[in-house]
Image: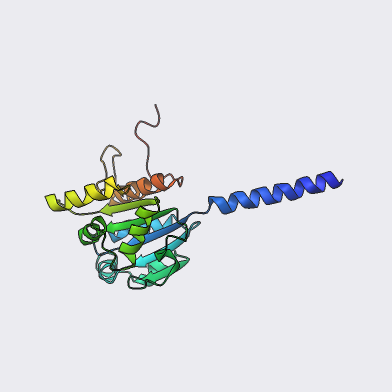
Amino acid sequence: MYSKYLASLHFKYFTTSISITMTKKLVVAVTGASGAIYAYRLLEHLKKETVYLIISRAASLVIDEELGLTENDFYKFAKFHYDENELNVPVASGSNELDAVIIVPASLSTIAKISNGIEDNLITRVAFVAIKENKKLIVVPRETPIPAIQLHNMEKIATNGGIVLMASPPFYIHPESVDDLVNYMVGKILDIIGISHNLYKRYKSNE
C-alpha cells in the first residue's frame, strides 16, 4: 500500500515537472515594419507559453493602420508587456533565462542596431542578450528590395547565431487566402522554437 502511495506521488511530481519544462519563456517584440498581422497571429498560437511582449511606438501606429487594433488587443495574449523604453525589467538581463527572442516584424532600423551592437531600447537590448547568452534570436524582416548595407547587417546577425526569417511565404502550399500566407510564416517561427502546429501543409507530406 505504502509503495503504491509513493509511486503515485512520484508520478504526480514527474508529470508536474514535465508540464513546467514544456512551457517556454519567449520574448515577442513588434517593431514598426509592415506585417503586424504576423505578430498577432503568432501571439494567438502562444497562449500556452509565457510571453513577454514589447511593442514599439512605431509598431502601435502600424497596428492601427494595418489591423485597426490597439496595443491592448495584443497585450491580452501576453503574461507580461513592456514599453520599449523600459530597461529595468527582468528580460533585459541575461540572468533571466529565455528560450527565444522573436522580433516580428523586424524593421530594418532594428536589424541595423542589433547587427552593430546598439542597445538603445528594450527590443535591441533583449536581442543582444539572446546573442550573448546563445539563445535563439529570430528576426522577421518584411521589406523589399533589400539594399546591400542591410544584407550585410542580416549577415552579421546570422553569423552571430541569429536566425533571419524573411517574410516571404512560398506558393507550393497553394494558398487560397492571405491567411494561408500568414499562417505559413507563423508556422515557420513555431517550427524553429519547437512548438507543434498544423498551420500549413508540409511539402509532399502525403507521400
Q: Nearer the viewer, residue 150 or 160?
A: 160
Please determine whether, in this image, residue 84 is positioned above or below residue 133.
Answer: below
Q: Is residue 118 left or right of residue 99?
A: left
Name the residue at the top extreme: 207
Quarter of the image for the N terminus: give it.
top right
Q: At 76% across and 48% down in the image, what residue appears?
A: 8
Q: Nearer the viewer, residue 143 or 37?
A: 143
The reply to whether residue 108 is visible in this rendering is yes
Q: Nearer the viewer, residue 54 or 60?
A: 54
Please determine whether, in this image, residue 3 is positioned above or below residue 31.
Answer: above
Percent from the top left, x then y, of residue 136? 38, 50
Percent from the top left, x then y, of residue 49? 49, 57
Q: At 36% across and 54% down in the image, what residue appears?
A: 132
Percent from the top left, x then y, of residue 74? 39, 66
Q: At 43% across and 44% down in the image, what residue appears?
A: 198
Residue 51, picture quadrant: bottom left
The coloring applied to the image is rainbow
Residue 115, picture quadrant: bottom left
Residue 112, picture quadrant: bottom left
Please determine whether, in this image, residue 139 is positioned above or below residue 206.
Answer: below
Percent from the top left, x then y, of residue 43? 41, 59
Name the residue at the right extreme: 1
